[in-house]
Image: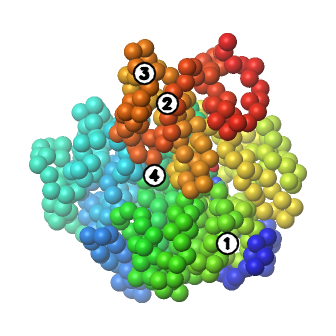
Amino acid sequence: MNMQRIETKSGNFNMNNYGETYQNFNWDEAKSNFSWHTTGKVNIAYEAIDRHAENPDKADQTALIYSAPDREEKLTFTDLKQSSNQFANVLKKHGVEKEDRVFLFMPRSPEFYAAFLGILKVGAIAGPLFEAFMEQAVRDRLEDSEASMLVTTPDLLERVPFNDLPHLKKVVLVGESDQKGEAYIDYHAEMKEASKSFDVEWVDLEDGMLLHYTSGSTGKPKGVYHVHNAMLQHYQTGKWVLDLKEDDIYWCTADPGWVTGTSYGIFAPWLNGVTNLVRGGRFSPEQWYETLQEKEVTVWYSAPTAFRKLMSAGEDIVKEYNLTNLRHVLSVGEPLNPEVIAWGMSALELRIHDTWWMTETGGQLICNFPALDMKPGSMGKPFPGIVASIIDNEGNELPPNQMGNLAIKAPWPSMMRAIWKRPEKYESYFLNGWYISGDSAYKDEEGYFWFQGRLDDVINTSGERVGPFEVESKLIEHPAVSEAGVIGKPDPERGEIIKAFITLNDGYSESEELLEEIRQFVKKGLSAHAAPRELEVKDTIPKTRSGKIMRRLLKSWELGLPTGDVSTLEE
Ligand code: WT7
């Protein structure tokens, strides 16, 4: 097999005229697929679910297959329409209004999806939080968004500092609980009482529907604000990149606490009327292969870190399963190594299609389409209607093969419309009409894009984005820690791991126990994925004269690289 180039296969999108379609594609063409095109009445949840439930040919099709070790359930489009209506009625009853922020902090479950869709149906803004978040992470997000309601489970409630959050009025509890009183709503009891009919709140295409918090190199996590109009991109990329067809069984492995789990774990499949598989429980190679086999998955969207784990479990295991239904595999979140693509060709007998995008972009932008010749290691080409380029720091386009800022001509349908309450932060993303991704890349003569790295200090560990500042802030809350500097250190399986350099306060001396205690402190405060895997005690942490931690220098030391310009280093 020639790994330099892997040939096309057919798909919904005809790549023979990629160039032509690229030139001519207009997002207006996508509009005719939605009911608001004729009715003028907009709501993304209506388009994703109710539109199919009202179509006699689709009403009884399975929309959601939920599969967890202790629970198996199938819900049709009609079931989801009704359960989300019930939840919308519960929200209305408790005074939730258009544009209110309603957050979700719970594992994936049928209740989660009914609640998420119900929130959108009342015109409120949903804020899904990853279930592994600990108190500080939950607090930061609820505080910043001024969420008025939270949907969670009795188990997770202890990580919610309810009394310190003045805007948070009510908590919906999914599951048996002793918590009683005005502020607590019993999910199951109220759902039982609620009507299955609801008049969907019609909104404007530019009205908000979703807040996803993500990290940058400085400051607390920022709320990336998305609007209903994003459905155009979710739908069209679902059709042309995920290559969804109506009889597909589609599995996206991402949690809806991250943008892949909403854009492609909720909207893209359902807007395309496709059966969506959600798997609860932990990762294990055997159970994942079993899921692919048992559920007859046809299209599968996952991440390099998962593929690498499957790869290290060996090819013999794969042979024990029948994966003949699988026809299309995709990846996102971090660079997809050519070795992983070679493994896919051998173990799955399929190409793994890399896709590039970000929380801020709301949808895929640079992709390997089913029908595009693949160059392993390249992220592919821009989606039709998307103009991507490599620009210098002044906003000028660079010629092929030169490395620079990966930038996208703004706007596009699913682009974020704001950073919550931080207009100056939002503005800082744009230069000369370009959206600046923070990634460096180059484009080859044939128009393929090649990822090179992050230009800021953001860490990508197992596909999860971690801001060094958050980890540093947590570290210095520990009584033993004086200063901290945090970097991403290359790792063959996780992409990067978090490495923290710390100085100790007087009276503390380095020991294995102390370092483990500090690690646990971050894990319990933020989340497991943000806890440093490596901790090193230093005498000083290098800083600029203005007091900024020089993470670049820490990284050069760690990797034994030249230290570059250190003229701003503090004496
Ligand atoms: C950052 C965005 C959008 C879904 C998950 C990540 C990195 C994303 C790729 C890829 C190389 C990638 C970039 C990007 N990234 N996809 N195909 N190849 N790097 O969303 O958490 O907002 O992270 O992930 O560095 O900027 P996110």
Vertical arrangement, residue 426 with respect to residue 301, above or below: above
- Which of labels 4 and 1 is toward the front? 1
Q: Gap between marks 4 and 3, in whole Å?
A: 46 Å
Vertical arrangement, residue 569 with respect to residue 291, above or below: above
Q: Gap between marks 1 and 2, in whole Å?
A: 38 Å
| Numbered tag placed on residue 509 in the rendering | 3
Q: Which residue corresponds to mark 2?
A: 472
Sequence-first disc among 2 and 4? 4
Q: Which residue corresponds to mark 4?
A: 210
Q: Gap between marks 4 and 1, in whole Å?
A: 37 Å
Give the secondary structure at mark 3.
loop
Q: Callout 4: 10 Å neighbours few (<14), some, many (20+)?
A: many
| Numbered tag placed on residue 342 in the rendering | 1
- For badge 1, the amino acid type reads Ala
Camera-side residue of 422 and 130: 130
- Which of labels 2 and 4 is toward the front? 2
Sequence-first disc among 4 and 3? 4
Quarter-wise, where is residue 315 in the image?
A: bottom right
Q: Gap between marks 1 and 3, in whole Å?
A: 48 Å
Coloration mode: rainbow
Q: Gap between marks 3 and 2, in whole Å?
A: 19 Å
